[in-house]
Amino acid sequence: MSQQEEQIECWFLIPILRNSVPREKHPTELWDVFHKCLRDLFHALSGPVDVFRERVKIRAIEDVRKTPGSWPNEQGEIINDESRKYTLLIAEHKVDDLREFLEKVANSFDQDEILCVVRGVKKSVLRRKQAGFLDGDLWSE
C-alpha cells in the first residue's frame, strides 16, 4: 500500500458470548487466533500489552472498552450482551477482504451477524457456512 493511498475507517463488534445456548464465553485461544488472523490480513493490531498480576509480567489483550448492546432472538426476546469493538483504518479496496474475514469470524464465534460499519454506513455481515472458519480455529464446527 502506498503512503498516498487513502484509508477509511471501519469498525465492527465481536460479542463476548456465543449465540448458542448455553451462551458461553469464547475460548481465550480463539481470541488469539482471531487477533493473529486480523494482524496477518491488515498488518496491524493494538496490543497485546504488558499487564502485571501479582508482580509477574504477562502479555494480554487488554479490553480497553467493552461495548454494551442488545438484540432480539428468534422468539423476539431482547438479549443483552457485551462486545469488543475493533476500529481499523484500511484501504478502500480491502473492504471486501474485511467482509470475507468477518464471515469466517461469524462462524468461528458462533454469531448470526457481525455489526460492521464502513464510513458511517452499516454493512453488517451475516453468517454463511460456506465461508468456513478462521485459520487455526480448532473449537468450532
Image (cartoon, grey):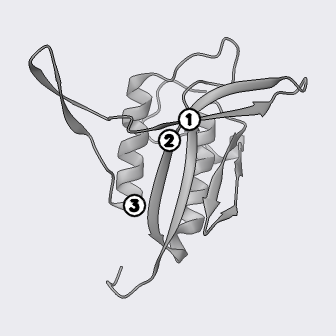
**Which residue is found at the position 53% from the left and 76% from the top?**
93
Tag 1 residue: 83
Count the marks: 3
Mark earlier in primary sequence (3, 1): 3
Q: Nearer the viewer, residue 101 or 8?
A: 8
Disc 2 and disc 1: Cα gap in Å? 19 Å
Tag 2 residue: 134
Instruction: Name the disc covering residue 42, or none.
Output: 3
Secondary structure, mark 1, is strand
Which quadrant: the C terminus?
Answer: top right
Asked which quadrant contains residue 17, the reply is top right
The answer to whether residue 2 is above or below residue 125 is below
Secondary structure, mark 3, is helix
Mark earlier in primary sequence (3, 2): 3
Label 2 Cα crowd, 10 Å radius (few <14 / some 14-19 / many 20+)? many
Residue 109: tell me if it is visible: no
Image coordinates for residue 47, horizontal then vertical, percent: 28, 44
Tags 3 and 1 in contact by the CB under 8 Å rule? no
**Which residue is found at the position 41% from the left and 84% from the top?**
5
The answer to whether residue 7 is above or below residue 67 is below
